[in-house]
Image (spheres, coloured by chain):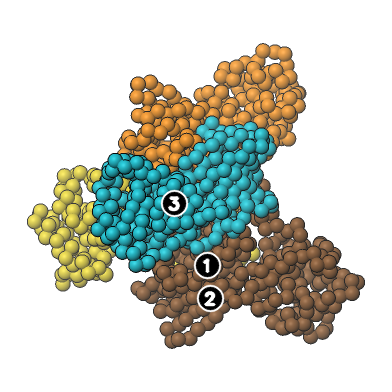
Chain colours: A yellow, B orange, C cyan, D brown
Amino acid sequence: MKFGIIANTNKDSSPATLASLCKLLKDRGHEWVLETDTSCLIENGPGIPAAQLKDHCDIIAVLGGDGTMLNASYRIGACTKPIAGINTGHLGFLTSCSEHELERLISAIENDKFTVSPHTLLTATIESTDGSQRQFTALNEVTLTRGHTSRMVSLDTRINGEVLNQYRADGLIVATPTGSTAYSLSAGGPLVAPDANIFLVTPICPHSLSNRTMVVADSSLIEVTPSEKTEETLFFNADGRDIVEVKPGSHVKIKKAAHVLPLLTISDTSFFKTVRTKLRWH
Amino acid sequence: MKFGIIANTNKDSSPATLASLCKLLKDRGHEWVLETDTSCLIENGPGIPAAQLKDHCDIIAVLGGDGTMLNASYRIGACTKPIAGINTGHLGFLTSCSEHELERLISAIENDKFTVSPHTLLTATIESTDGSQRQFTALNEVTLTRGHTSRMVSLDTRINGEVLNQYRADGLIVATPTGSTAYSLSAGGPLVAPDANIFLVTPICPHSLSNRTMVVADSSLIEVTPSEKTEETLFFNADGRDIVEVKPGSHVKIKKAAHVLPLLTISDTSFFKTVRTKLRWH
Amino acid sequence: MKFGIIANTNKDSSPATLASLCKLLKDRGHEWVLETDTSCLIENGPGIPAAQLKDHCDIIAVLGGDGTMLNASYRIGACTKPIAGINTGHLGFLTSCSEHELERLISAIENDKFTVSPHTLLTATIESTDGSQRQFTALNEVTLTRGHTSRMVSLDTRINGEVLNQYRADGLIVATPTGSTAYSLSAGGPLVAPDANIFLVTPICPHSLSNRTMVVADSSLIEVTPSEKTEETLFFNADGRDIVEVKPGSHVKIKKAAHVLPLLTISDTSFFKTVRTKLRWH
Amino acid sequence: MKFGIIANTNKDSSPATLASLCKLLKDRGHEWVLETDTSCLIENGPGIPAAQLKDHCDIIAVLGGDGTMLNASYRIGACTKPIAGINTGHLGFLTSCSEHELERLISAIENDKFTVSPHTLLTATIESTDGSQRQFTALNEVTLTRGHTSRMVSLDTRINGEVLNQYRADGLIVATPTGSTAYSLSAGGPLVAPDANIFLVTPICPHSLSNRTMVVADSSLIEVTPSEKTEETLFFNADGRDIVEVKPGSHVKIKKAAHVLPLLTISDTSFFKTVRTKLRWH
């Protein structure tokens, strides 16, 4: 089997973990290719750009934490090869195993003892008044928030063309089930089991106290427009990565992406167990 | 067309509204039958028990508010005939129109200008240690709560056989999308659009502050068991109606009911609009 | 110096800890008396009832956790002698030190290296329609809640004679700063530093979503009356201990008690540190 | 009696209301002076700068809403003359009466039928690494928040020199009782009665779910420092007015201001009633 490997190049422990993984793959008779930056960690070889990695391997392994996974999912792009996250730090929601379980992971893959859990992605399109469009993909969430010089934003929000609400708030978060454990949670949103086919629409610090997260079917088209009277600049953000100024008069359309993120899961990994541990329920 | 009619018999205005409805039906050439208690409001006729009403009509009309609808849905039982709620008081989440829109409702029905919105129901089965089983159906929610002499309950909760959490709380609510605007909301749960296929699992006053509502797919089997060490009595409740003592050692299984509640909706009725109005967002 | 000692008699480790404490006191040349039940743990002597303990010692030592402290504070009654909690389990909010710090505690007392932190108590008076009155004291909170057969209570609440709100909820909690880390917190209340002279009035599962905790000065008279239309029984509860049925027409007056609970604190004990640890902020 | 008058000069109705007030004062034999900008609304006279108004009158009248009051309190500066807010729009928390109650207000003042409610102010001092200091006063709250390019801020927070917490959040709000109904409320903070001598410390979208508002005595010194590792810029904001970039290494000290805002209150004005109305509790 052939592995494509991406590692968090900012982490001191990455070269060692990467070396262990490569040695293990070699011992087991597997092949691998390294992503360009990752390649510099241990080899002189040129490596392969992240966006092309999926074309050169059967399975993608990512070394790092949830942040690395989030970043890698973005750089890899639409992909049908299973992606296995190898956690090099704290327990994560997106990773398949810890760096101390490399053998277990490889054995599971060799013996077909894994499942592929398709994670829904969001596509957001910002349409400006000049007709231009920009498109973004997110695994966790997209947000529209006030800049630091404004006191609030006023956002007309529609679901499938129907008015949901005009939110007056610090901002609005549209999150996937995956994103339910990220920023959405800090803003008061609920947790979502991976197999619930929904999105969460959550205002940040809403002026109206009775505002709550709205759970909508993930087949919904969510449209957000700064209210007409608004002259404030606001900021769009996908997965905390792309930050884009949204001019008055713009229009943001959010829906399920055409592709999913196929995360590899090995047995004994439970979303609920990870939630209990990460949120310190016990 | 033939209507089966149930009215809230505790409401002073019911006889007048009922008379108006019957007159309108007569003028339009429709037939109707009345539920037994409803029958006593304006006729001497015997009427038909609520549970048999569906077999004697094409459409069921319920006069009252959300409480009357909740109660009627229970008394009618599994039913495929459309149910139209006629609101005689405040705006409701379950009613189709107000009592001032009777003509509009009948015209919509005559001209096939309505949709039927299938509302998911919950089935809960309480299995006792002696092997006996009791089954309940709920439109809004089922709850398991402490009695007034206990300080809390400890509830082992599983989703599809997998441990979700051992909740230490005043109780636990499992709600449908319909129930998201009822008790679940008071306990901090999110709002849910009618087409999101999920259930909400929400602890009441949890001891662990990081506990939040868990959104699960409505295909899930939710099992709740008083924790082994618990000797406290707890109480099961379906839609605030059936209140049942749950003995230590019992086991509660909650899942989607085999049938749905087919609520009639006429155009211009919007869940989001009702939410905005009822929750006073503007 | 003379110590009066109360231990949690339900805890297996109590006799050993008690013996250690007594030995240490003897070695250091101190005297002690034991509370009646505590006395049975290690001695044949008769002991002294908890309510009289304060008259026979200079300082009271309580062995157990926060629950033991809560219970002891009730049994000791109004008392000006410092009370030192010795924690025999998890870190507590009310205890002065752990059972492994007995020497440190005694040295601090011998060298006057402690402070006495006066903890505000609540007095609640239930006035019935027949003119009878019952009075209760609470260190954490008093609550008025629905019974398990009701859906909610409706409570007219006044502050210093002025209408605060008619709460429609599962119940209402009036908490001291000490109680801010207990039941009030589960119901969504804020944390309160020990030197803030306030009470917290927090509805449990309120029907109105914009209801929030109201922070009032601890000089306030808080009056709670079941709303006129209410026929439901409700239940009064002080510190989760006294549970009293409150009949329709009754009236509950809540204010600061005339006496405080003088808890002994030794250096390095910080309320904020305990909060961070107990609530797992890090 | 001599009145100093400030009006919201951006409001179309201000000239008419101002004229009514002046006519009424004239009819009743009172004198008045106008603030400079206000003066331009109806007179050619030069007017008096807001900061000097208190030296030329017995009582200050402010025409506008809560925003105008907030702004006026800042421009007037430390002041012992009673300030009466005359509401020209929605019901407010800071105003004494509506524009339709001018006669009632003047009569109350003439007959000494008013009270002066001292509203606590916050003083915040930003100390930079170069030793420079900037000082700000706030009636509602001061906030420290992330800029729109950061994901969060990490804020070391101390109360009276003791560590409260290292907050990882979108920001932190320190609010007065007056500010408890403003931004702090949107972020989840409790309501505070005007006579409770406390400040509220509330994180905005905290990463740790168990974070809650901390209520501290208003005699407390609150110190907030960006955590050492933080390189992100953050923004300080007093009453949504002054927005200041806070460089890494800076230190913010927050405490009760030496002076209060003496707001005039006439009978029948109740904080709780205003809360019930503004938050739509009924």
**Number of residues whose C-alpha sits closer than 10 Å to that of mark 1, classed few (under 14), some (14–19) or many (20 or more):** many
Which residue is tagged 3? Answer: C55
Residue D161 position within the rendered picture, expressed as x and y whole percent measured from the top left: 43, 72
- Asked if labels 2 and 3 share a chain, the reply is no
Q: Amino acid at mark 1?
A: Val
* Chain hosting mark 2: D
Which residue is tagged 2? Answer: D124
Compared with C270, D250 (above or below) is below
* Chain hosting mark 1: D
Judging depth in this view, the residue of B20 and C196 nearest the camera is: C196
**Label 1's element?**
strand
The CA span between labels 2 and 1 is 10 Å
For the point 47% across and 42% down, the residue is C240
Of discs 1 and 3, which sits in the foreground? 3
**Label 2's element?**
strand
Q: Taking the image as drawn, is residue A134 in sight? A: no
